[in-house]
Image (cartoon, helix red, strand yellow):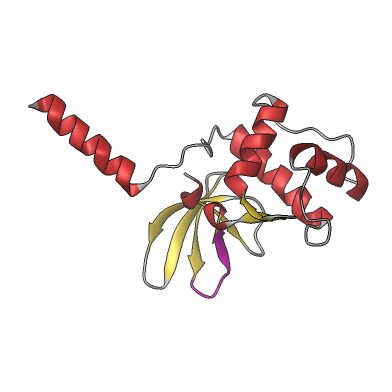
Amino acid sequence: MLSEILSVTGRPGLYKLISTNKNMNIVESLADGKRVPVYVQEKVVALSDVSIYTQNGDISLREVLKKIKEKEEGKQVSLKSTSGKELFGYLAEVLPDYSRDSVYAGDVKKLISWYNILIEHNIDFEAKKTEQSASDETETKKEKEN
């Protein structure tokens, strides 16, 4: 599901991919449901392509979001303030080996914001459906029909 959820540079919030064209994509804002075009020259990143730097390499955003969900028991994150010290303290609880040299306060703030948006809109970021598992499901359905 995270491959269909996008962050568009210069635009607040997250967007769901609706359709793809040669010169642009149509996306829908998760905040207000408005559909807008996103052109080729705009920087768009699928959340499935995002990772967080750690001392031992990178960890996918999906894994970090799962850890936050476990810590928060499926609820939204509510911090008393958004000071760098509190943001990094929170991240250290969730991901103790994050890279202190490569992760910035703005990154953590965006991570928490994205998590809250995904939870608010009941988007399942834990499911990672591969083409293989989709084809396995199709085979299973065919077998049941016969």
Front-most of 31 and 8?
8
Q: Is residue 28 above or below residue 120?
A: below
Q: Quadrant of residue 24?
A: bottom left
Q: Count the numbered circles shown.
A: 0
x, y (%) of residue 76?
70, 31
Q: Residue at x 64, y 50 (%)?
A: 13
Answer whether residue 31 is visible to the viewer in this image: no
- Is 52 in front, or is 81? 52
In the figure, residue 25 lies in which quadrant?
bottom left
Whole-percent x and y of residue 110? 72, 50
Residue 120, image x and y in percent? 62, 33
Point 51% across, 47% down: residue? 2
Question: Which segment is the magenta one?
Answer: 40-45
- Secondary structure predominantly adopted by residues drawn in magenta: loop
Residue lying at 7% horizontally and 27% vertically, measured from the top left: 146
Residue drawn at x 14%, y 33% as measured from the top left: 142
Q: Taking the image as drawn, is residue 12 in sight?
A: yes
Q: Is residue 44 magenta?
A: yes
Q: Residue furthest bottom?
A: 41
In the visual, does 135 lie left or right of 10?
A: left
Q: Is residue 120 left or right of 46 when viewed as pictured?
A: right
Residue reaching furthest left? Answer: 146
* Residue 82 shown in magenta: no
Left of 13 or right of it: where is 2? left
Image vertical order of residue 125 relative to residue 106, above or below = above
Q: Residue furthest front?
A: 56
Q: Is residue 108 above or below residue 21?
A: above
